[in-house]
Image: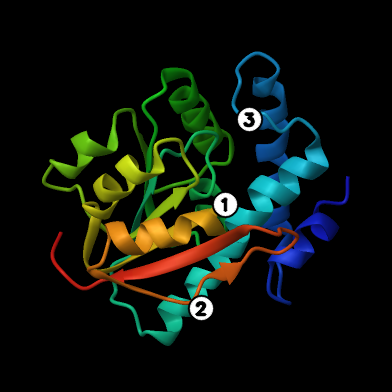
């Protein structure tokens, strides 16, 4: 399968390096293998997995790279991915920006085990899996990051306020959500300064919404 052609709509002209493409290929192979026995994703077709999961994640990663550069972001390079599931968008974010230090939050044991296997197989460094709930990490001494990501989850309106507590002061919160959830995000987190939603390529209703924390959560 031509991975590059499926990812092209989601990436800037520079695209990915050959090494990054091989990481994507190895990740996809592992996901397809595990998905036969463990329900990691309801999307079964490789091409659709690349476009829907990898594509959206890389669109987030490339957009954030532009935002952080334009804003002259602090030297803090830590991110937290809430409800990482099969690793989206957290692991593609790490592949795209390998200098970032990441924590993937996943309370489901089998999914957490899968994430650890992906990290081992891809030989990713400075990235860990937190096998618990976001509420638990938020209460810890190291429970905040300059970047927090969240992809559409169940109970969005109850998960979002907890997710916001993980965002350090002046940090960024990046949401991959349906356009119908934009209003809820604005109402639930009025202390965030929200950018204009960015429509996701090849989607009629999904967007990337990026907000900046203006208070100490």
Image location of residue 200, percent across then percent down: 65, 63
CB of mark 3 within 8 Å of CB of mark 2? Answer: no
Dot 1 falls on a residue whose secondary structure is helix
- For marks 1 and 3 on the same chain, the one whose residue lies earlier in the sequence: 3
Which residue sits at x=76%, y=30%? 44
Viewer-side residue, 199 vs 145: 199
Residue matched to label 2: 66
Label 3 crowd bin: few (<14), some (14–19), many (20+), radius 10 Å: some
Image location of residue 173, percent across then percent down: 36, 62
Q: CA distance from mark 3 to mark 2?
A: 29 Å
Q: Residue furthest top?
A: 37
Viewer-side residue, 19 vs 180: 180
Label 1 crowd bin: few (<14), some (14–19), many (20+), radius 10 Å: many
Which residue sits at x=45%, y=78%? 67
Viewer-side residue, 111 vs 56: 56
Q: Quadrant of residue 175?
A: bottom left
Q: CA distance from mark 1 to mark 3?
A: 16 Å
Quarter that holds the N terminus: top right
Label 2 crowd bin: few (<14), some (14–19), many (20+), radius 10 Å: few
**Could one spot residue 23 in this view of the protein?**
no
Which residue sits at x=79%, y=38%? 46
Dot 2 falls on a residue whose secondary structure is helix
Q: Is residue 185 left or right of residue 87?
A: left
Which residue sits at x=41%, y=38%? 83
Image location of residue 95, percent across then percent down: 56, 54
- For marks 3 and 2 on the same chain, the one whose residue lies earlier in the sequence: 3
Residue matched to label 3: 41
Q: CA distance from mark 1 to mark 2?
A: 16 Å
Residue matched to label 1: 92
Q: Looking at the rendered structure, which numbered label has been put on residue 216?
A: none
């Amino acid at each position: 399968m031509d991975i590059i052609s499926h990812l092209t709509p989601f990436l800037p002209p520079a695209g990915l390096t050959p090494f990054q493409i091989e990481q994507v290929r190895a990740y996809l192979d592992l996901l397809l293998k595990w998905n036969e026995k463990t329900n990691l994703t309801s999307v079964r077709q490789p091409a659709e997995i690349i476009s829907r999961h990898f594509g959206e994640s890389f669109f987030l990663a490339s957009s954030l790279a532009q935002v952080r550069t334009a804003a002259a972001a602090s030297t803090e390079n830590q991110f937290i991915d809430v409800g990482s599931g099969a690793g989206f968008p957290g692991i593609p974010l790490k592949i795209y920006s390998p200098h970032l230090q990441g924590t993937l939050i996943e309370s489901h044991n089998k999914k957490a085990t899968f994430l650890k296997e992906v990290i081992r197989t891809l030989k990713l460094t400075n990235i860990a899996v937190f096998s618990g709930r976001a509420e638990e990490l938020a209460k810890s001494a190291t429970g905040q990051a300059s970047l927090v990501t969240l992809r559409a989850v169940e109970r969005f309106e109850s998960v979002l306020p907890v997710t916001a507590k993980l965002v350090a002061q002046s940090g960024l919160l990046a949401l991959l959500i349906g356009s119908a959830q934009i209003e809820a995000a604005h109402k639930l987190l009025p202390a965030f300064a929200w950018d204009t939603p960015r429509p996701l390529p090849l989607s009629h209703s999904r967007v990337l919404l990026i907000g900046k924390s203006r208070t100490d959560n």
